[in-house]
Amino acid sequence: MENLWDRLDPYPFYRNMRADKPVYFDDTYRIYGVYRYQDVKKVLGDYNLFSSQFGKAFNPEGGPFSESLINQDPPAHTKLRSIVMKAFTPRAVERMESSIQDICNELVEGMKKGETDFVKSFTYPLPVTVIAEMIGIPISDMDKFKRWSDTVVGGSPESYADFPTAMKEMSDYFMNMIKLRKQDPKDDLISAVIAAEVDGEKLSMIQTLGFLILLLIAGNETTTNLISNAIYVFDQHPGTYETLRNDRSLVPQAIEEVLRYRSPVQSIFRVAKQDVDIAGVTVPSGAVLQPWIGSANHDERVFNNSEKFDIYRKDNRHIAFGEGIHYCLGAPLARLEAKVAMNTLLDNFKTIVVDRKKPIVPQDSDIVFGFKELHVKAE
Ligand code: HEM
């Protein structure tokens, strides 16, 4: 879809697709795009008809990512998810709150010293530092994580070319960490995942590896974009930042509206398990589908004034974290990070506006949606 949608504002394109081609076969990529809310919800949620084993559709040789939670169907998914949930618990997330606050405080000090790129100074380092701390990996390796996860979600020809090397490097890195923790467990997520078992079953080495790689990527590329998108959209809607400064109780619902209005994950993949009819189009068994969450969350059939950014929106049934059995495992962590981040920014700056004289560089991906570079004036 590279040339069809605008990476800063795909919404007019989506609106046309919802109206005229709600299920559209892209001949170049040989993928069926799905654009309306109810259809996207069905494709994401109905695991009897739509498989999550899309990793194999793109990379038949498989690998740790193909073995990870996000790429599995029941019954394997059910077992995997119940094991990893023993490690990734609400308590483990809550425990991160004071660390998140400390990291935010430190990053704000950095912003005050004059770094204007909000991604570089704030939204990128926050989630990667949090997830690294939670997993139990040294923050000194942060640049490596950034490179690996950018490559894995990137949509450019260079990213595709670098993908196998990034995967190999990440696998070697985590394999070594897993070995170390097996010998000497610590109070971290790697050790908890190694120890977790359900009905006497534990994760295999490749499953543990897949989970850690998934966490690193999911925890890295999504929350960054949520916070960048928030500041971008507040800037497009003057007065929002000030309203939030005056009434902090609105922060959580403002974050939910950002999740809907500029969803950090715009699309996901599925594979049809049988011939299936969606909005009058027959999608053949084995075909790859791309349900567009970003479009679904603007569907005028579901949301009143769907193209309006409204922090007072009632009944915000966005599906930014997915739907059904694969519903985002990290949603509570992402929401907590966004809330602490937003409150820290509101505490420290009277205004934050986008500096339009400097480059605004969107992500070059069909999946994650946000900015590589977004300069702000924070005062
Ligand atoms: C704003 C931030 C985030 C957004 C918008 C987001 C979005 C999503 C979506 C749409 C899915 C469903 C994928 C599917 O149906 O195939 C998902 C799954 C997942 N997310 Fe997130 N995510 C975010 C943050 C995080 C964080 C911080 C973590 C972990 C640290 C995380 C971990 C996961 C995992 C492990 C899954 C797979 C769950 C499964 O397959 O059962 N996510 N996420």
Image (tube, helix red, strand yellow):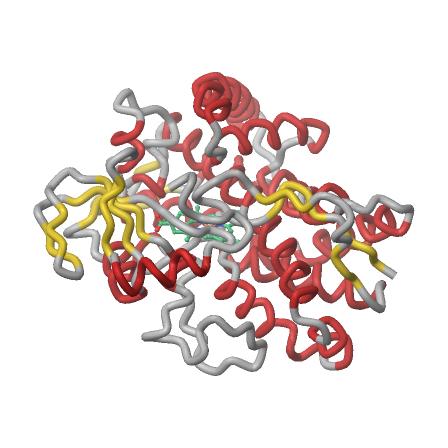
Residue found at x 44% / y 73%: 306
Q: Position of residue 82 (x, y in %)?
A: 35, 49
Q: Which residue is painted at 24% across and 50% down in the image? A: 24
- In percent of width and height, residue 156 lies at 48, 29
Q: Quadrant of the N terminus?
A: top left
| Residue 73 visible to the viewer | no
Judged left or right of residue 53, residue 357 is right
Residue sticking out furthest to the right: 113
Q: Examine the rendering and report whether any part of residue 122 can be seen.
A: yes
**Along the line of sight, which residue is nearer the eye, 80 or 29?**
29
Location of residue 71 with respect to 44 vertically, above or below: above
Quarter of the image with the C terminus is bottom right
Who is closer to the viewer here, 276 or 198?
276
Residue at point 46%, 38% (across, down) = 214
**Residue 188 on image: x %, y %:** 59, 40
Give residue 232's quadrant in the image.
Answer: bottom right
* 23 over 248 or under it: above or below: above
Instruction: Kindly give the residue lying farthest to the left in the view shown.
Output: 275
Q: Residue at x 73, y 41 (%)?
A: 120
Decide which of 308, 42 is in the foreground and name it: 308
Residue 149, by quadrant, is: top right
Query: How many tags in the picture?
Result: 0
Residue 346 point in image, percent of width and height: 78, 67
